[in-house]
Image: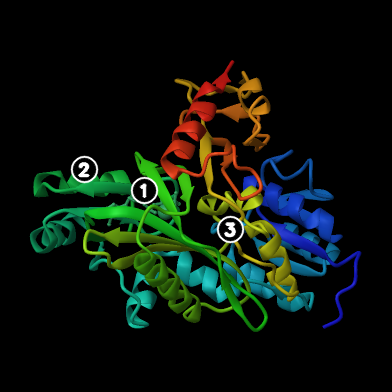
Amino acid sequence: MNVTVPGPTLGVVGGGQLGRMLAEAAAPLGVDVIVLDPTPDCPAAPVAREQIVGDFDDPEAFRELASRVDALTFEIELADAALLDRVADEFDLSVHPAPETLETIEDKLVQKRALEDAGVPVPPFRQIDDAEDLRAALDEFGAVMLKARTGGYDGRGNVPVTDPADAEEAMDAVGGPAMAETFVDFARELSVIAVQGDDEVRTFPAGENVHEEEILRETILPARTTDEVLERAEAVARDVLDTLSGRGVFGIELFETEDGEILVNEIAPRPHNSGHWTIEGARTSQFEQHVRAVLGWPLGSTRLRCPTVMANVLGTVEEPQPARLGNVEAVLGDADASLHWYGKDEVRPLRKMGHVTLTGGSELDAAAESDTDELLAHARDVRDALTFE
Ligand SMILES: Nc1ncnc2c1ncn2[C@@H]1O[C@H](COP(=O)(O)OP(=O)(O)OP(=O)(O)O)[C@@H](O)[C@H]1O
Ligand SMILES: [Mg+2]
């Protein structure tokens, strides 16, 4: 293929922080982005060329988007897969990853079945339609994580259950068709950001993820585990990509068990929060890779530049309020820190509002930190100094 710049215009369904960072990464490549999102002035709007305001299943809005772009992608699982497929067909556009892949992934039960059928290691799981199914799963597994099949994120839709007496309440909490998997007593959580290009797969080095209350707090590179585990994580990620179709970036969340086995938790068919470290920490960011991949362009290097920690800036408020971040000097005054603010109007308890990235030592900068534990502590200090006013 002959790549020319200015390049094509990319249509993105979803204009949250991922759409914003996609548009930021696309601009230097000469690629304009148009986003579709229901929230007027969504996070991506100020950096995209244009926003089409519409729901993730609004045929007219999809057609409007398709009529103005050269290729389609999405940054949110709520994008209507069948509609994407239809509209892409109608306007003779490519859409990546494939809508069928989105369809498989958006239902956690269907996703896990597809992985299991392909021989990818996953925790044992069962379909749960009612409290009786849940009690049977508890009987079989002891403790489970009950998960809504669709629509869950940041731990919403997930309920840990151990006591059969809690079954009815847990079913009410997930509020619909569910799946249950064994509660994994993991040693740590890892993720691999993998890129499916035109004729090759590239993976970023696995990151170590710290979750609290099922919400990602920090990602640490390099992960504090053995080379053997890192290699296994990469191999599993490649096996996962073999089961999916279409080009693009995929976030693959993994559990490392106490005996060094890797199990797949879930897949995101898009750039992932645990890959935000790549903006400063890798040679090419996951967002640039996604743009390159969906356009069928050559992929960039996934090399780690230096030890890197990403710390999420979550809403540390009791009640929703207008979003204004204070004490930003804590980041600006730190030579190793970078701020990414997502531009959301309202801060809510534990809402993802931005992130901070800390980069550590390289051969060129002997004074910088190369110890991951210290870098993590440093990142937390910088992040925790930020306040909502
Ligand atoms: N089977 C399990 N055993 C133990 N902990 C689990 C299990 N499943 C999930 N968790 C914990 O809950 C977190 C969130 O779970 P999961 O990734 O399924 O939810 P999500 O809401 O889709 O998350 P995301 O924020 O990635 O969209 C996991 O990262 C992990 O810490
Ligand atoms: Mg997850």
Q: Residue at x 56, y 43 (%)?
A: 360
- Name the quadrant of the N terminus: bottom right
- Tell me the SS state at disc 3: loop
**Dot 2 alpha-carbon crowd within 10 angstroms: few under 14, some 14 to 19, many 20 or more:** few
Q: Does the beta carbon at disc 1 come under 8 Å from ligand 1? A: yes
Image position, residue 274 (x, y; %): 50, 52
Tell me the mark number nearer the camera, choosing from 1 and 2. 1
- Tell me the SS state at disc 1: loop
Image position, residue 352 (x, y; %): 53, 37
Q: Please state which amino acid type lies under the numbered disc 1.
A: Gly
- Name the quadrant of the C terminus: top right
Q: Please state which amino acid type lies under the numbered disc 3.
A: Leu
| Gap in angstroms between the C-alphas marked 3 and 1 | 34 Å
Disc with the residue nearer the chain's start (3 vs 1): 1
Instruction: Report the residue marked by disc 1.
Output: 157
Task: Using the rendered view, name the quadrant where residue 27 is placed.
Answer: bottom right
| Gap in angstroms between the C-alphas marked 2 and 3 | 45 Å
